[in-house]
Amino acid sequence: MKHTEPALQIDIRGATSAKLAKAHRLNPSDLQGIEPRIRAVLKRMAAERTQGKHRYRELPYRLVECRTIQALAAEYRPQVENLVVLGIGGSALGNIALQTALNSPFYNVQPRERRGGPRLFVIDNVDATYVGDLLDLLDDELPNTLFNVISKSGETAETSSQFLIMRELLRKRLGPLGARRNILVTTDASHGSMRAIVDREGYRSLIVPDGVGGRFSVLSPVGLFSAAMCGIDIEQLLAGAAAMDRRLDAPRLAANPAATIAAVKYLYTQRGKPLHVMMPYSQQLRDMADWYRQLWAESLGKRYDEQGRREVFAGATPIKALGATDQHSQVQLYREGPNDKLIVFLEVEEPARDVTIPHAFADVEAMRYLGGATVHGLLNAEKKATEQALQVSQRPTMTIRFPRISAHAVGQFIYLYEVATTIMGYLLGIDPYDQPAVELGKKITFHLMGRRGYETRPTE
Amino acid sequence: MKHTEPALQIDIRGATSAKLAKAHRLNPSDLQGIEPRIRAVLKRMAAERTQGKHRYRELPYRLVECRTIQALAAEYRPQVENLVVLGIGGSALGNIALQTALNSPFYNVQPRERRGGPRLFVIDNVDATYVGDLLDLLDDELPNTLFNVISKSGETAETSSQFLIMRELLRKRLGPLGARRNILVTTDASHGSMRAIVDREGYRSLIVPDGVGGRFSVLSPVGLFSAAMCGIDIEQLLAGAAAMDRRLDAPRLAANPAATIAAVKYLYTQRGKPLHVMMPYSQQLRDMADWYRQLWAESLGKRYDEQGRREVFAGATPIKALGATDQHSQVQLYREGPNDKLIVFLEVEEPARDVTIPHAFADVEAMRYLGGATVHGLLNAEKKATEQALQVSQRPTMTIRFPRISAHAVGQFIYLYEVATTIMGYLLGIDPYDQPAVELGKKITFHLMGRRGYETRPTE
């Protein structure tokens, strides 16, 4: 695939249209007004990048690692019928999103010969039925089941529990050697409890890169191994991300898609629209919106400013929606409820396949007009209709247009949104890379579960 | 199952705790203050119910219909390997929620002997890959595939398109007789395009009850048939709903769970917390939150008051979350972002099954403390920890506690939330049963697709 892959396009006409009243519209002057700040943010980011910050931005260029992952996947693939990823949050959302974007919605129920690899189960929760039923399902197939444990530190209670359960089961059924063969751990190169266990037990491992937070890690071995196992072209993912990277140094807002997304979302946040809906008109891009949900919420929801001094309670609430499905669930609210949302559509121009709707019931108008149209044509007409209906109700929108869904385009999208998140964080004046508020819940869990060192109930 | 099933409990201590500052707490005086309005709403609803309004409230008592559905399911089940539901919005969300709540998360990938019925596919979108890949999957299995088309009117473009595609395929592969045998339509008893087609083609059909909107229809044949096919005890669902009904006439707020939910959510909406998160700590209840999302958004998001005169732009934005998974995605925002949310947890006391975490790595504390605990114990500890962490951050919560997940409990929950929605609508002074804003998008779609009668672009 050496031909040039087409680029994602950003369309903000749904936010700048003269059909919107002044209170809900972005004027050229609004965008010009924020341009100097954007320029300063981009300059700062470029300087910091040369100093080794924003490390996720280097992931698209780790081609040697990419080939190692491909080789490992090629080695495992012939013997593995089931790949079970044990991870949560940033160690699961990207894996799920890649799988559903780039493989069939029916991947796991398809016969093996139609799949590009093993069945994939991403066990991203501690739920007894979920875990127990998985054990039942895999009972007869344990010899051909590979468990990919993803945890940078080994401190995550959910992943550690799952690891303990699966390891014990493998040891019982396949012996210590089998357990070793069927576990692959993705963890820190040298630190943490999980690294210690890997070294002691002799598990094979992949490395979670330093300086890349979980929610920015999908283009690292964290997300790439399961993708490669399931037949996704991970080189093209990285190529797409690198192609997007080349567009993101542009200092002019209009030429820089990440800056455009951040600027539009920032301006609306300041104007009483802090609910940021992502609504793919594509069943396959559905879980990309879930991945975005973590990226946006955890990066931007911050009590203190970057210096840790001023209370800001910053953040915008990401909301995952799905077109056309949610026209029948959420659009009533989006049109008539509080005008507090910006809706970002994902649209796909060229479908990977299409289905023609047959002609029938020529005398029943509710059926007749559909005959001869295609399913994709209908979906995109619905997107346009929803966009226009929202505009009539004075609700702003924007569109990110995929020429088609490919590993390259998905790579572009991931990288685009990661950088947009960093820019948005800097505009809000907060640190987009920490997550201090997650700690207390973890500590109280340790306390409740009787972990040593947490004997007294933590209060922060 | 004639023994008494335990009742769902509502716990609002996370909203009334003295640990919350005044601005974020509900005081006894707040609840007393709204009690007269609640009483008036309940009185009005009771009077209207005797006049034939709130028709969804009678669904739990349609036992004859329930037995008809069971008999039909029993007849189909031995021959049907795949059940495909064609529907969208209220004709899909309830079906999905019942299935995932009451059957295994791995239902469709399990071998048939472990399942209670056929594989279930609910095709709730028009997406070419989604539809096309389903056709490939079912290609060899069409004779044993039943399509349940759910559309009250036949006017829904998404469902009609799918119906046309599947009908054509069946006719090609199985002839007109096969097409007739493998299609079951759930539609209006006497009106609409779909009823006309049913009568003409001779399809078997189930009836969408009059006066029950899509989002309130899960306990009708719309939701019950697919559930019965997949081995769910639909009598127990209805029994649970009826049991809940008996609790919902109580005029005192504290004794009436639906009134309590509505009052708490209404009071917080008025106080700057119009984002209503539902966060089940249960993988199985995950899609119940998606069902709730439609119910809450489409019922309450209204531009005009009930009289259609005053602009109110009412509504609260429902947000679907999942514990423990979203601790690693959303809780950073929920704790440190804008204090604009009320978080409603769903908690399960007694799991259907549990898995013990084995002891291992006694010298690695990150593993040691987990040994001997159960997965369900860990999950509920995480829920408690999250609740406490949110409280430290002055974020209100409440909990709906399931004694266990059963058809009875799910029936209770569905009925509870439906009535809470009606009460909330009346408190907001809007009509919870219409959805006027959905029409424009449909009309513009008709226009774009060339439907007769929509030659000029509709503007409302």
Image (cartoon, coloured by chain):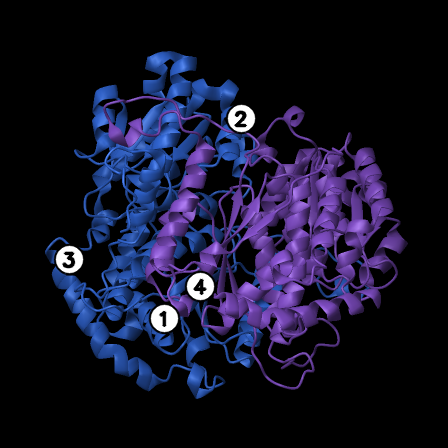
Chain colours: A purple, B blue
Disc 2/disc 1 C-alpha distance (Å): 44 Å
Q: Which residue lies under the disc numbered 1?
A: B265
Residue B148 position in % (x across, y down):
36, 31
Q: Residues within 10 Å of mark 4 (few under 14, many from 20)?
A: many
Callouts 4 and 2 close, C-beta under 8 Å: no
Disc 3/disc 1 C-alpha distance (Å): 24 Å
* Residue lying at 40% horizontally and 63% vertically, measured from the top left: B317
Q: Toward which corner of the image does residue B72 lie, by quadrant?
A: top left
Q: Nearer the viewer, residue B66 or A43?
A: A43
Q: Amino acid at mark 4?
A: Lys
Labels 2 and 1 within one chain: yes
Labels 3 and 4 within one chain: no
Q: Residues within 10 Å of mark 2 (few under 14, many from 20)?
A: some
In the visual, does A455 lie left or right of B310?
A: right
Q: Which residue lies under the disc numbered 2?
A: B137
Disc 4/disc 1 C-alpha distance (Å): 20 Å
Disc 3/disc 4 C-alpha distance (Å): 36 Å
The residue mark sitting in front, 4 or 2, is 4
Q: Is residue A53 visible?
A: yes
The residue mark sitting in front, 4 or 1, is 4
* Residue lying at 46% horizontally and 48% vertically, measured from the top left: B101
In the image, residue A261 above or below residue A206: below
The residue mark sitting in front, 3 or 4, is 4
Labels 3 and 2 within one chain: yes
Q: Residues within 10 Å of mark 3 (few under 14, many from 20)?
A: some
In the visual, does B153 lie left or right of B295?
A: left
Residue B141 position in % (x across, y down):
49, 20
Q: Toward which corner of the image does residue A377 lie, by quadrant?
A: top left
